[in-house]
């Protein structure tokens, strides 16, 4: 097994499916201890079991990241059980596009609560550990999962894109704030990745767009493609910080 992240303590949110799950497996395969966070406990337990069978080390913490107090308890547990986290993959997110005139206020709120407030809860709870670990071990990583939606303009994606523009812009600010403390900050901006993200979409137009994209034969990215990038950036020499990485399916316009 690759030992390039041996001794690192990783935390991955949204690890019960898709990109987070693949990233947790990748980081564990590279030798990191990985705490996996999401709401669905059974999914996390089977992930931890799978990682363990391959000789890796992981710990499941069932938590809703929109609950700031619960996130703080999760952070305390990680520090107690594994030591301070030095690699945080802030990945939990939801995409619910809809025409603005439909006034889907529940879905607007859900996206803001998870993609913005949830992300901030996790940053708030774990940044002290990242800073401390970086001082002691020389480097730590804060990786925020943004999206190509932070840059590109799509009809009906205004609220989701707004949340992801927040993630990218926040990350650039945090990089200059935390970089001098040896904490690298990265925003990843993937194009379409085949995950459960699309299963939550209810908007007819978006569902049709996704179906058309599939029928066109365009190869979507896989969660493992994104996991590879996270593993790569975390294993770079401590002086190198990939600030922003856009990862597109080759054929996606
Ligand atoms: P998935 O739907 O497969 O994964 C989302 C994860 O977030 C799940 O593990 C889910 O677990 C978790 N989650 C949802 N709500 C909460 C909550 N309140 N508290 C804790 N965890 C929660 O989608 P992806 O893997 O695709 O998405 C991961 C990230 O990647 C998202 O931020 C998304 O915006 C981004 N992204 C995805 C792209 C794609 O095309 N798939 C493209 C660009 C960016 P549970 O339900 O168990 O809590």
Image (cartoon, rainbow, N blue to C red):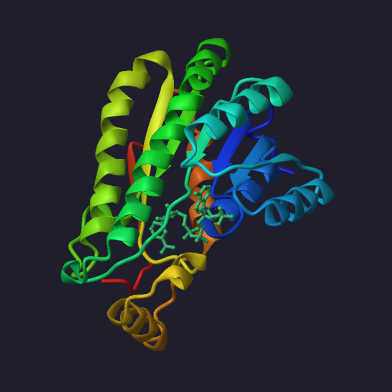
Residue 30 lies left or right of residue 50; in this view the side is left
Q: Quadrant of the C terminus?
A: bottom left
Residue 81 lies left or right of residue 154; in this view the side is right
Q: Quadrant of the N terminus?
A: top right
Residue at left offset 27%, top offset 65%: 104
Whether residue 202 is visible here, answered yes or no, is yes
Rendered location of residue 82, percent (x, y): 70, 25
Numbered disc total: 0
Q: Residue furthest bottom?
A: 215
Residue at left offset 81%, top offset 44%: 55
Residue 242 lies left or right of residue 166; in this view the side is right
Seen in the picture, residue 49 relative to 78 is either above or below; the reply is below
Residue at left offset 67%, top offset 35%: 32
Rendered location of residue 170, percent (x, y): 28, 35
Whether residue 240 is visible here, answered yes or no, is no
Nearer to the camera, 137 or 91: 91
Nearer to the camera, 146 or 95: 95
Q: Residue furthest top?
A: 136
Residue 45 lies left or right of residue 135; in this view the side is right
- Which of the 4 image quarters holds residue 64? top right
Residue at left offset 64%, top offset 54%: 40
Nearer to the camera, 164 or 213: 164
- Which of the 4 image quarters holds residue 213? bottom left
Seen in the picture, residue 174 relative to 148 is either above or below; the reply is above
Rendered location of residue 98, percent (x, y): 26, 70
């Amino acid at each position: 097994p690759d030992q390039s992240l041996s001794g690192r303590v990783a935390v991955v949110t949204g690890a019960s499916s898709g990109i987070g799950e693949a990233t947790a497996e990748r980081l564990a395969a590279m030798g990191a201890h990985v705490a996996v966070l999401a709401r669905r406990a059974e999914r996390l337990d089977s992930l931890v079991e799978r990682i363990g069978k391959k000789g890796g080390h992981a710990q499941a913490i069932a938590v809703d990241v929109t609950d700031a107090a619960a996130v703080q308890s999760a952070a305390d547990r990680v520090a107690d059980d594994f030591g301070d986290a030095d690699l945080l993959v802030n990945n939990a997110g939801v995409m619910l596009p809809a025409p603005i005139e439909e006034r889907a206020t529940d879905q607007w709120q859900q996206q803001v609560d998870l993609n913005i407030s949830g992300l901030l809860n996790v940053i708030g709870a774990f940044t002290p550990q990242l800073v401390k670990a970086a001082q002691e071990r020389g480097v730590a990583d804060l990786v925020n999962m943004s999206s190509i939606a932070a840059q590109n303009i799509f009809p009906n994606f205004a609220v989701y894109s707004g949340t992801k523009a927040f993630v990218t812009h926040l990350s650039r600010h945090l990089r200059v704030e935390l970089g001098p403390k040896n904490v690298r900050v990265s925003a990843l901006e993937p194009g379409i990745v085949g995950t459960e993200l699309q299963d939550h979409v209810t908007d007819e137009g978006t569902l049709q767009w996704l179906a058309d994209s599939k029928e066109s034969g365009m190869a979507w990215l896989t969660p493992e493609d994104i996991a590879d990038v996270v593993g790569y950036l975390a294993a770079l020499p401590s002086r190198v910080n990939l600030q922003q990485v856009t990862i597109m399916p080759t054929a996606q316009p």
